[in-house]
Image (cartoon, grey):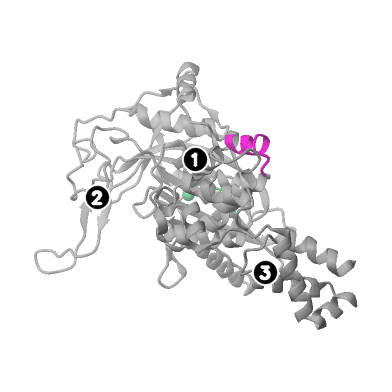
């Protein structure tokens, strides 16, 4: 494996404005075809676009969050091409003067923190949709319908430098970006509805080469899983072509999730093919510092700030803090737990949110905002671990019962009803330890002959005798004392 994969992502983030970027039509998803296509969206002659301030403000928010340069003046340009779902025959976008330049996003890939630099982000309108299924023409022939409801929906296209080196890194970036735009409230993040779509640019080169290879662009991947698979497939395909002595064609490809492969769609246009020019219908977009300040004043605490606070105020590791601030809803939930816990209990709270709770949510395909166990109920459970009433292991059973709705999800009631209180009475534990030592002389001999594993086995026996309820620290201490004396 002497190949290196190079990835740059372009992400289309649908901005959460009520109306479209250049018209007053609604952006509500799912309406009957063409019921939300006004005269501007249909490109009727004589109509003119009017910029939506809300879309600009969302772009500014994003720029502030990633430390981008916000252009004091940016320009809308026409990107010319013909397609049936684009009635103007051009898309209004931004070209050489986008609203945002530079900036970066820092996130974790597994245990490793990494930063990806952004090239730019620009505002543009979405096109309509061609409906290829279930349409027949006057002679029964299959045909295509056009739905212009989506035409003019505001998009922020966020472009990275070609800096990512694995499919896993690209997916981690996409997840972090998704978390951020949802956190800011500038995008609803709904990937099934197309509110967040990634184009992956992929190339490969021999390790050590400093020139980038020819890239292909995989269009419109709308799930993280498919993004990963599409990149893996495409990199493998390119390596095979090159190893067989072939060359890579710069082209646009489509990922087919049913077959788990990418297919050529069309050769890639170059920018000059689009005949970009400034749109004479729209004045340059002027964003002065006063406007930026007003936007900044209305922004929520940013993930990076919250992450820092979780580290300094609560003593969490950088990794835990980053995981907890991937999504605002998770950070909110976690903070609510901590508010109900004694000082210094943030670490077990983090472990529970990122471990047992995350697993249960994932298993039932729920968002944390839909968690059947509330943050307060969670805090009640963790309190009983922290104060030594139950062990972590028993707490998992209590949590499972809470999840199922037992005793109104009241941890104390479940502990009481099931008799799960931890045994902390030294005398009682000593008695159990003595019994185990008497019952397992062979293991005791093993321990004495230097086998450390034998010790764990004895701890296990005592815990079994206590049906999991003995305080593990006390068991360990008493056992050591008796064995080593
Ligand atoms: P467009 O796709 O509109 O032609 P660009 O040429 O600016 O735009 O590139 C778009 C994306 O492709 C960027 O994210 C960039 O990082 C990425 N990219 C450019 N060259 C390569 C390459 N050789 N390998 C992988 N990604 C690349
Ligand atoms: Mg592109």
User: Which residue is identified by label 1?
Assistant: 332
Say which residue appears at 58% left-offset and 36% top-offset.
Answer: 306
Element assignment for label 1? helix
User: Which residue is identified by label 3?
Assistant: 463
Residue 314 is a magenta residue: yes
Q: Nearer the viewer, mark 3 or mark 2?
A: 3
Q: Which residues are magenta?
A: 306-316
Examine the rendered structure and indicate whether residue 120 appears above or below residue 456.
Answer: above
Residue 267 appears in view: no
- Choose the circle earlier in sequence order: 3 or 1: 1
Task: Please give the label number shown on residue 30.
Answer: 2
Within 8 Å: ligand 1 and the Cβ of disc 3? Answer: no
- Choose the circle earlier in sequence order: 1 or 2: 2
- At which x and y percent is residue 391? 62, 58
In this picture, residue 56 sits left or right of residue 50 = right
- At which x and y percent is residue 149? 24, 45
Task: Please give the label number shown on residue 125.
Answer: none
Report the number of discs. 3
Q: Nearer the viewer, mark 1 or mark 2?
A: 1
- At which x and y percent is residue 316? 66, 43
Which residue is nearer to you in this view: 405 or 12?
Answer: 405
């Amino acid at each position: 494996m002497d190949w290196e994969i190079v990835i740059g992502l372009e992400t289309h983030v649908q901005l959460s404005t009520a109306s479209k970027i250049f018209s007053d039509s609604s952006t509500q998803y799912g309406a009957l075809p063409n019921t939300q296509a006004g005269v501007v969206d249909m490109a009727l002659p004589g109509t003119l676009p009017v910029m939506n301030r809300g879309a600009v403000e969302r772009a500014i928010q994003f720029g502030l969050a990633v430390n981008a340069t916000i252009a004091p003046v940016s320009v809308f340009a026409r990107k010319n091409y013909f397609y049936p779902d684009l009635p103007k025959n051009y898309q209004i976008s931004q070209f050489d003067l986008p609203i945002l330049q530079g900036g970066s996003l820092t996130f974790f890939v597994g245990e490793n923190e990494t930063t990806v630099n952004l090239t730019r982000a620009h505002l543009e309108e979405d096109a309509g949709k061609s409906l290829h299924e279930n349409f027949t023409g006057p002679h029964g022939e299959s045909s295509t319908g056009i739905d212009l409801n989506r035409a003019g929906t505001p998009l922020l296209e966020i472009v990275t430098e070609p800096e990512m080196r694995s499919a896993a890194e690209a997916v981690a970036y996409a997840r972090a970006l998704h978390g951020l735009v949802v956190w800011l409230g500038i995008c609803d993040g709904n990937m099934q509805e197309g509110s967040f779509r990634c184009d992956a640019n992929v190339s490969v080169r021999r390790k050590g080469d400093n020139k980038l290879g020819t890239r292909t662009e995989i269009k419109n991947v709308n799930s993280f899983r498919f993004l990963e698979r599409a990149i893996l497939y495409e990199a493998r395909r390119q390596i095979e072509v090159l190893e067989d002595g072939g060359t890579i064609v710069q082209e646009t490809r489509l990922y087919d999730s049913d077959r788990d492969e990418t297919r050529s769609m069309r050769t890639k246009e170059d920018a000059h093919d689009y005949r970009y020019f400034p749109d004479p219908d729209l004045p340059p977009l002027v964003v002065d510092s006063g406007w930026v300040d007003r936007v900044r004043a209305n922004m929520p605490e940013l993930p990076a700030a919250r992450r820092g606070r979780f580290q300094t105020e609560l003593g969490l590791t950088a990794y835990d803090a980053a995981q907890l601030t991937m999504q605002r809803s998770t950070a909110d939930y976690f903070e609510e737990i901590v508010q109900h816990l004694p000082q210094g209990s943030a670490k077990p709270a983090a472990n529970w949110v990122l471990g047992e709770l995350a697993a249960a949510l994932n298993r039932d395909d729920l968002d944390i905002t839909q968690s059947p166990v509330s943050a307060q109920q969670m805090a009640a459970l963790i309190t009983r671990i922290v104060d030594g009433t139950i062990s972590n292991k028993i707490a998992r059973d209590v949590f499972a019962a809470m999840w199922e709705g037992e005793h109104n999800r009241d941890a104390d009631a479940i502990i009481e009803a099931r008799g799960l209180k931890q045994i902390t009475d030294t005398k009682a534990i000593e008695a159990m330890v003595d019994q185990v030592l008497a019952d397992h002389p062979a293991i005791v001999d093993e321990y004495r002959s230097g086998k450390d594993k034998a010790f764990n086995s004895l701890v296990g026996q005592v815990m079994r005798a206590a049906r999991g309820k003995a305080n593990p620290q006390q068991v360990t201490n008493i056992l050591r004392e008796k064995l080593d004396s």
